[in-house]
Amino acid sequence: MTGVFAGLKVIDCASFIAAPAAATAMADFGADVIKIEPPGEGDMYRSMLSTLPGMPATDVNFPWEMVSRSKRSLCLDLKSPEGKAVLDRLVQGADVFITNLPLPARRRLGIAWEDLRGLNSRLVYGSFTAYGETGPEAEKSGFDSTAYWARSGLMDLVRADAASPPARSVPGMGDHPSAMAFLAAIVTALYRRERTGVGGLASSSLLANGLWANGFWGQAALHGLSAPPRPRREDGANACTCMYRCADGRWLSMAMLNEERQFPGLLGVLGLTGLLDDPRFADKATRRANAPALIAIFDTAFASRPFPAWRGLLDAAGITFGPIGTLEDIPDDPQMQAAGALVPFAGEAQLTISSPFALDGEEKAPPRRSPALGQHSSEVLREAGYSDADIERLRGLGVLG
């Protein structure tokens, strides 16, 4: 294994989604990640999310492929004394232990920080929770839809307008960015270990990440302020930072912040230079006061050409905008591939989504397909010093599923 994390042993004893996704990013950079799964159907994320109502009918377990790639699966019954003994031995040789099991479940299984810290003084224990490690709700369960999006105020703020119901999130929409904050906690703990030789508890939560994501308005609230009710798009306060529909039905989002300099150029692109003499739009203040009227004019202009035409014109004029992409755009997006955001599985044409950061001079490991349940159980145990006879005994006891 090569990469900046080559030689690091990571135990992924987590599920749904942020905590194992942090382990995936470590695997991308060469860490040896051992995925602990219970006997039976394994990690619930393996068998559950892609089969929920509203999911596309497919034989491809697409969420599992992304979050569990490049890991080795060890099927282990942690409820049995023998299974717990196996885990303890693995922890003694591990660098990082990652879990997001609810705090009461960790105590029942004997895998809480207090249980494992004495086994390995260099261990970095990565703990991810819904609502934090302390406080009256620390033991409460939660998902990104509840603890990240709903609790933080984001669901309320991103509704289409004040009269619309709160906006629904999509699966993993808060988990995947939370995974990067969790990874930062783990890597910071590893850096401290390099300086002190001692590991420790590194933690993050959906609640903290949701609040951080809503930091703009969250900080306003801390100063006693509130966000104004979101208007309908057509009644927006700024025509230069609005969404527009093109002739082919595609939408674009414009974010022209350097308005005083770029507004004449935008009117030229849209064929609306006559508006330069319109007193309603003479400067930023009048444009704000008459924003709905300007949005209506821009709506008519953008509806006259398809998106590819506008893309070329706006790019040439240096106007900041972005296509409002669809899922169908992603596989063939040349920039996503050129930037390394999309990468192929090792030896395949099938793409997967890479972890969203890079390091100069460090190549990410080519992603390997996600493992079958217990695929590497014998391999991992042999590396931990178990003989073939030991492994067969554990299989006979049902410890390995």
Image (cartoon, grey):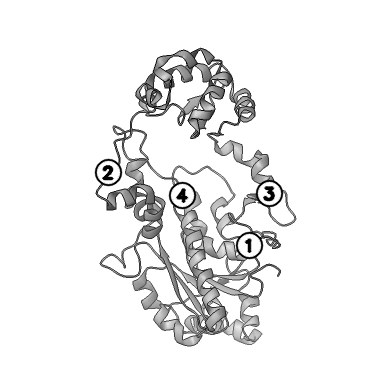
- Element at badge 1? helix
Q: Are marks 3 and 4 in contact (CB under 8 Å)?
A: no
Foreground disc of the pair 3, 2: 2
The type of residue carrying mark 1 is Asp
The type of residue carrying mark 4 is Met
Q: CA distance from mark 2 to mark 4?
A: 25 Å
Q: Which residue is mark 2?
A: 226
Mark 3 neighbour density, 10 Å: few (under 14) some (14–19) many (20 or more): few
Judged left or right of residue 10, residue 132 is left
- Element at badge 4? loop
Residue 216 coordinates in the image, percent (x, y): 38, 48
Specify which label sits upstream in the sequence, 1 or 4.
Answer: 1
Q: Quadrant of the N terminus?
A: bottom right
Q: Which residue is mark 3?
A: 350
Residue at 57%, 79% (x, y): give it: 194
Specify which label sits upstream in the sequence, 3 or 1.
Answer: 1
Judged left or right of residue 160, residue 122 is right
* Residue 394 visible (yes or no): yes
Specify which label sits upstream in the sequence, 1 or 2.
Answer: 1
Residue 113 or 14: which is nearer the viewer?
A: 113
Q: Are marks 1 and 2 in contact (CB under 8 Å)?
A: no
